[in-house]
Amino acid sequence: ARLLLRAAALRCTQALRNAVIACKAVGEWPHLAVSGAWGDTPAARRASFFTADGAANAELLAEHLVDYSLSLTSSASTSGLSPAARAQSADVLKGAVRHCIHTSADYAHRRQAVFDALIGQQESEEVRAALQHYQHWLFLSQRRFIALAGLFVPEISCDSFCLAGLANLDGGKSTSPERMIQSLGYGAPDYESMSTNSKSGEFFFFSKDRRFLIKTVTEKECVLLARLMPAYQDHIRQYPKSLIVRFAGIFKAQVGTKTIHFVVMTSVFNPHWKVHETYDLKGSIYNRKKKERESIGKDEDWLANGCHVRVSAELRRELCAVHELDATLLNSFKIMDYSVLVGIHHLEEGEKEGQDWLKSGGILSEDGSAVYFVGLIDFSIKYSLKKHAETLVNVLKGCDQRASCVSQDSYAMRQVRFVRDHVFRAEGCDEDAGSLGVLTVHVFSGRNLVAADWQGTSDPYVRVTLGLLCQQTHTVQRNCNPSWDCIVKLPVNAQHTTQNIELAVWDEDANRALRGSDDFLGKLLVPMAAVLAEPQELVNARLLDIKHGQLTVRLAFQPEGAHSQHPCPEPEARTGSSSEATSATP
C-alpha cells in the first residue's frame, strides 16, 4: 500500500513540475488569464498524468530510490532535498529492504521446519545423522525471490546469499530466521537511521530493538563477502568466542533497473545495556581522531583518554589469541581496513552481573566497574591495486608506517600489536605471555651480511615473527658483521604450534621517502614445534633467499607460569665456521 501511494504521489509531483516552473517564471499562481501555465490545448487538458503501467511506476520508484542513495553519499545532493523528500525516499528504500529480508527469512524458516520434520520421521540413525550433518554444515547458497508487479507496485527482485547457512552458526541464538522476522520483517517496527563517521557513504539502519544492523555495500564488496563466507562459517564454528561480528545475510535488491547490495549483521552491543563510550580502533594513529560533533572516538582518542579493556591476565591472553586468529582469517583473503569496535558501559553502584564473558555478550572489567562490548567490523575492503597506489603515496609522504592504508599483512600485524599493547590490559601483569607461554629469542650476531647501501655496508636489524606477532632488535649502523646481543620475546598461542618462527635480517633505510622500504638481507625459518620440544641453538646458520650471510641465535620456550623461573639459557658456543651452520628450514 505504501508503494502504491508513493507511486501516485510521485506521479502527481512529476506532472506538476512544469506547471510550478511556469508559475515561477510569471511570478503568480495560474488562473484562466495565464497562458501556458497548465497547457492550452484540449489534449493537454484531457491528458492524464496518472498511469496504471506497473513498469513505468517501477522505473519512477527506482529512480527515486537512487536519488535517495546519492543524497546519502553527497552533501550537495542532501542539501537539495527537503526533509520530507528524504523521509519519503527512505521509506521506499526501507520497504524494498524489508521485503527482501522478510521473504528470505520466511523461506529459511519454512525450510528448517521441513528438515526438522524429515529428520523426525527417519528410523535410521545413520540417515538422521547425515541430515543433521547437512543442516549443521549447510552449503552457502544463493536464492532469488521475486515479487511480481501489481497496480502501481513495482516488481522487486531479491537475491539472498548464505542466509540459511549463517542461521545455525550458534544454534540460532542470534541470527535465526525467526529472530530476523521478528526484528526486521513485515510486522516489525520501522527501522532507525544511524549517523556514522564512515567516509565510504554507506547508509546504516538499525532494527527498532537494536539487535540488527543493515548496511549497504558495493557490488565488489558483496562478492568479496560471499567468497569469505565458507571460511567464515568454519572459523566461527571452530572459535565460537571469535570477535568477528555475526552476519545474518547478504542481499541484493533490484527495483526496476536499479540495484542495491546490503548486508545484515547482529549488533556488537547488547540492546539492553546503554553504551556510554564508543571507539573505532584500526591500530593506526595517523589522522585517527574524531572530529567535532562526531560521537565515536578513534585510535588517538582512545590513547589520549587512557582507555583500556581491563580484564584478568588469563582472559587477556584468551582475547588476544582470538583477535589474532580473526585477523589471520581476514589477512588470508587480503582484507584490510577493518576495525575493533569497543563500547563501554559504566556500571553504577550495585549494578553487577557475572564474571568475564557475560550472557549479555559483554566482558566485565576485573574491578567490576564497567562492561565492555568488543567486535571486529568493516572487513569488506580488499588490498587492491588502488590501495597499493595509496600506500606508495604514503611512502613518499613518509607516513606509510602510521597511515591506515598499508598492505594486508602490515595492517593485520600492526592491529594485533596495538590490541595487545593498548586495548586489553591486565593489572599487575608485566610479561606479555600467550595462552601457552613465551618464546625467547636471543639474537647474538650476524656474519658476512650483504652490503645493501651504496657505501658498501648495511644498517642491519633482525625482525622475529611468529604468526602475526613480531618484535625486532635495535639497528647496528654501517656494519656487515653486527653484534646485537639482544633478547626478543613473543607470546605463544595454541595456533602457533604448527607455524614457523621467521628471523629476517633487514637493512634499515632512514630516508624511506627516497629509497622506499628497507632492504631484505636473508632469513631463517625455525619450526615452533622443534622449539617446544627443546631449545634450538643456531650458530652461524646460513641465511636463506640471499647470496650470503649468517646468523647466530638461540630460541627457547617457557610455558605459561614458568617463564619467570626459567630464563633463556646462554649458548655454550657462539662462534664457529660456516660449515657448522644449522639448516633452519623445516
Image (tube, helix red, strand yellow):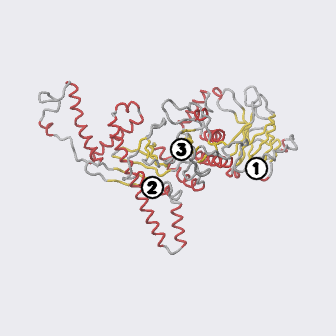
Mark 2 vs 3, N-terminal side = 2
* Sequence order check, earlier mark of 2 and 1: 2
- The amino acid pointed to by label 2 is Arg
**Horizontal and vertical percent position of residue 521:** 73, 36
Q: Residue furthest bottom?
A: 123
Q: Residue at x 75, y 30 (%)?
A: 458
Q: Residue at x 77, y 31 (%)?
A: 476
Numbered badge on residue 561: 1
Q: Circle 3 sits in a helix, a strand or a loop, which is it?
A: strand
- Neighbor class of circle 2 (other Cα within 10 Å; few <14, some 14-19, many 20+) is some
Residue 525, given in percent of the width and then of the height, sits at 73, 45
Up/down of 393 relative to 183, above or below = above
Q: Quadrant of residue 567?
A: top right
Of the residues shown, which amino acid type is indicated by label 3? Ile
Front of the two marks 1 and 3 = 1
Which residue type does callout 1 highlight?
A: Gly
Q: Which residue matches tag 2?
A: 179
Q: Which numbered mark, 2 or 3, is in the foreground of this view? A: 2
**Rendering coords of residue 584 (x, y %):** 77, 47
Image: 112 above or below 251: below
Q: Where does label 3 land, which residue?
A: 377
